[in-house]
Amino acid sequence: MSQIEIQHLYKSYRNRRHHRRGPNDYDPGEEIPVLEDVNLCVENGEMVCILGPSGCGKSTLLRMVAGFDRQTSGEILIDGQPVTGPTSDNIFVFQQSGLLPWMTVWQNVELGLRRLTDQAEKTERIQEAISLVDLEGAETLYPHQLSGGMKRRAELARALVVNPKILIMDEPFTGLDFFTHLRMREEVVNMHEFIRKTTLIVTHDIDDALLMGDRIVVMSGRPSHVKLEKVLDFPHPRNLAKHPELNSLREEIFFMLGVSDAV
Ligand SMILES: Nc1ncnc2c1ncn2[C@@H]1O[C@H](COP(=O)(O)OP(=O)(O)OP(=O)(O)O)[C@@H](O)[C@H]1O
Ligand SMILES: [Mg+2]
């Protein structure tokens, strides 16, 4: 049994606009199909990277796996159980930094363990999460004292401290400068090699997906379904120049996403 099983998933939203904007727009109140028959299985410990055109429903899909949104039809099973709402077993690392500005790194990470009463265990788990994301020494700093990359690490520590079954990241490197992006990518791969937690990552960056994922999934435009799914059985650290198969897959995906002329 796969850890996550997404079966015949459909999602539509009701159009809230009061006017049609053009011939291809939907009528007010009409259902807008976003996901149409999405099928996907994710194995325990696997890192799956999801790519797709903007607005195709990637975040919607992640939100439903995390239990924050409900599908129109179809099923999402985690360890064989249907997802009925958010639980701290699966956790989201949000697109934008959600650190509380009046709390230090330590206190922000501690938030995930509010309900834990054993102080010694709490301290140990916070320390472990902070060290996993390489933020030792920054425990007493406030978010405004952190660089963009450090903020992202603190966010990740906050997710890891809960020891979730599944880690869900929606565009985790957005807004980082080029070098910080590369460094964070490398660190997420190292961390994954170390903790082997089931991870779903949505990214717009094809290279991120090719260099990180155990599997890559490309979604079609809306209404969206899985257009391509490939296992990437290449050791880390990966290098596109060393693997012609990855390079041709890269071209195929650019073509699929309709931007082949930009490569
Ligand atoms: N709560 C909502 N109510 C109505 N429509 C919504 C809602 N959430 C998302 N949508 C619509 O569903 C579609 C998919 O949105 P979603 O945010 O999942 O796309 P995405 O693939 O994550 O896009 P991006 O790559 O730009 O982040 C969009 O057309 C969006 O307008
Ligand atoms: Mg999104």
Image (tube, grey):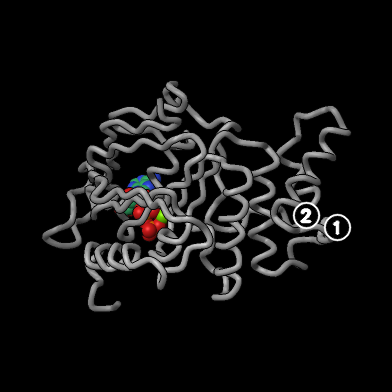
Identify which amino acid the numbered label 1 is placed on: Thr
Q: Residue at x 64, y 51 (%)?
A: 156
Is 18 in front, or is 221? 221
Location of residue 147 in the rendering, given as x and y in whole percent from the top left corner: 70, 69
Residue 66 disc label = none
- Which dot marks residue 140? 1
In which quadrant is the N terminus drawn? top left
Q: Quadrant of the C terminus?
A: bottom left
> Residue 141: which quarter of the image?
bottom right
Residues at marks 2 and 1, CA–CA distance in whole angstroms:
6 Å
Q: Is residue 130 above or below residue 162?
A: below
Q: Is residue 169 left or right of residue 207?
A: right
Disc 2 on helix, strand or loop?
Answer: helix
Q: Which residue is mark 2?
A: 105
Marks 1 and 2: in contact by CB < 8 Å? yes
Compared across the picture, whether 232 is left or right of 221 comes to: right
Looking at this view, name the residue that lies furthest to the top. 81
Amino acid under disc 2: Val
State the image coordinates of residue 127 (x, y, percent, origin top left).
81, 46
The residue shown at (82%, 36%) is 122
106 relative position to 221: left or right: right
Image point (60%, 71%), residue name: 180
**Mark 1 vs ligand 2: CB below 8 Å:** no
Image point (46%, 51%), residue name? 201
